[in-house]
Image: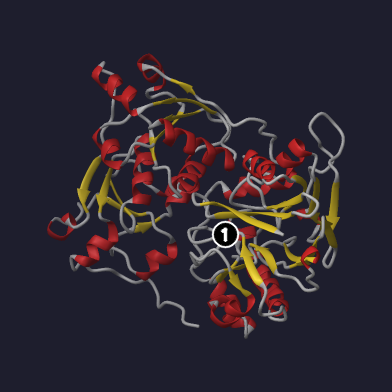
Amino acid sequence: MLLRMFYDDKLAQASYFIGCQAVGEALVIDPERDVDKYIEFARREGMRIVAVTETHIHADYLSGSRELAEKTGARVYLSDEGDADWKYQWIDKKQGGGSYDAVLLKDGDTFRVGNIEIKALHTPGHTPEHMCFMVTDHGGGATEPMGVATGDFIFVGDVGRPDLLETAAGVAGAKEVSARVLYRSLQKFKEWPEYLQIWPGHGAGSACGKALGAVPQSTVGYEKRFNPSVRAAEDEERFVRFVLFGQPEPPLYFARMKRDNKIGPPILGEIPRPKALDVDGLKAIAGSDAAVIDLRGWQKFVAGHLPGAIFSTVSNALPNTAGSYIMPEEEIYLIGTEEEVREATLVLIRIGLDKVVGYATSETFEQYVAAGGPVETTKVKPMTALLDNPAPSDAYVLDVRNISEFQEGHLPEAINVAYTRLIPRLSEIPKDKPLLVHCRTDNRSAAAVSYLQKLGYDVTHLSGGIVAWQMAGGVVEKDKTLLEV
């Protein structure tokens, strides 16, 4: 058996290629939309992708299952568990007409890829239809499974958050119910053989959990012993409190991913190839309604950027920033190096922002500035400056960390709105007062400041954030005692 993990460190997302070398057939679990990487890998290994599946209807990225089925003709295996609201709706919508070669799975169903047996296990809680896939390599003489692709059920050090149906998809009252369902699923997990390898769907940095580890895989036995969420599942009430406490606010785009993955992600076909802009092209979009993402680095952005540009680096900040501030119908322009533009384009299409139409290199931007093109600067001052010169009485101190971080300690006068939730809460942020914006250090607040500046707010970035403030002896206020379990 050939097992290869494809890991996207921007989304902290793992997909798995499982191949039977004896017959040259392969399965891909939880693919991303840019599917050529799986097809090319299969070609190099002398294999054909004959099957594709996914553990659940994802919230953090667009699935590539439909795309891969279109390009390879692979059979699609999808969950048929969960209620009527969480069934796949794209199976009969093949591009050009007709239906995909699809098999709907129930708990305990099995299928084969060559000599490899895949057993579907219904593990609801993160989502109602969630499945894990237990893998047995009969070609190697095994009669018991080697491991389990656990999707967003079991992570290294955590479990999949059960609140997203409510906090991201808007299903009122769902999170506690889902937490109790997840508790019951974990009782079944505890019966799995301890030697089984765990191949999780995400790693550290994913918003699908609150404490994911950075180790790529684990075992059932290890997680039973040391995973805090699994250990909390000795008691249902304790587990519900523990798993719901401290979950970060989901990025705004999660609701759209849930919807699109259910009804069917648009067929991408080819990766967008944005057109290079010259100085005149930059002048044409300066201050327009176009979405511009400046990838050049914070200090360069502060010193001068295209009016209306949003700041992000090509990192795990990009999907959250772009997904929270840009809508799929908007045309997107990028400013950065050729390599940054290529990487950013891939990140954007993975969250359904496909209209990447143009870009300018840093050199072109410098030529634009030299030619008198309009630029904006961003106001910055150290967070610690407030120690000697407190914020003016008419200022509005905005803390854009997650609510759980805010509750652990914040400036007494600060108001909290997570940077990923600015759009639905803009009415709470006054436009007639100067804004002082910070986060833990600088990253999230930099993105928030750029977006608020685009909207016309009088905004100043407090560099160093709450970390610098506390290191300098600044006073923080706690909202409530942290939960202990």
Position of residue 283 in the picture relative to residue 326 (left or right)? left
In the image as oriented, which residue stretches furthest toward the bottom?
234
Point out residue 151 in the picture as x, y percentages from the top left corner: 65, 61
Q: Is residue 260 visible?
A: yes
**Which image quadrant is residue 302 in?**
top left
Residue ID at (20%, 48%): 381
Residue ID at (29%, 44%): 433
Position of residue 359 in the picture relative to residue 22 (left or right)? left
Point out residue 223 in the picture as x, y percentages from the top left corner: 58, 77
Residue ID at (41%, 21%): 285
The local crowd at label 1, few if under 14, some if 14 to 19, many if 20 or more residues have their Cα within 10 Å, is many
- Front residue (pair 467, 411): 467
Local secondary structure at mark 1:
loop
Q: Is residue 247 above or below residue 453?
A: below
Applied colour scheme: secondary structure
- Front residue (pair 433, 101): 101
Point out residue 382 in the picture as x, y percentages from the top left corner: 20, 52
Q: Is residue 300 above or below residue 444?
A: above
- Front residue (pair 285, 97): 97
What type is the residue that disc 1 sits on?
His
Residue ID at (61%, 49%): 255
In the rendered image, the quadrant that contains the N terminus is: bottom right
In the image as oriented, which residue stretches furthest toward the left?
388
Position of residue 422 in the picture relative to residue 235 (left or right)? left
Instruction: Residue under label 1, please give it.
Output: 202
Q: Is residue 52 visible?
A: no
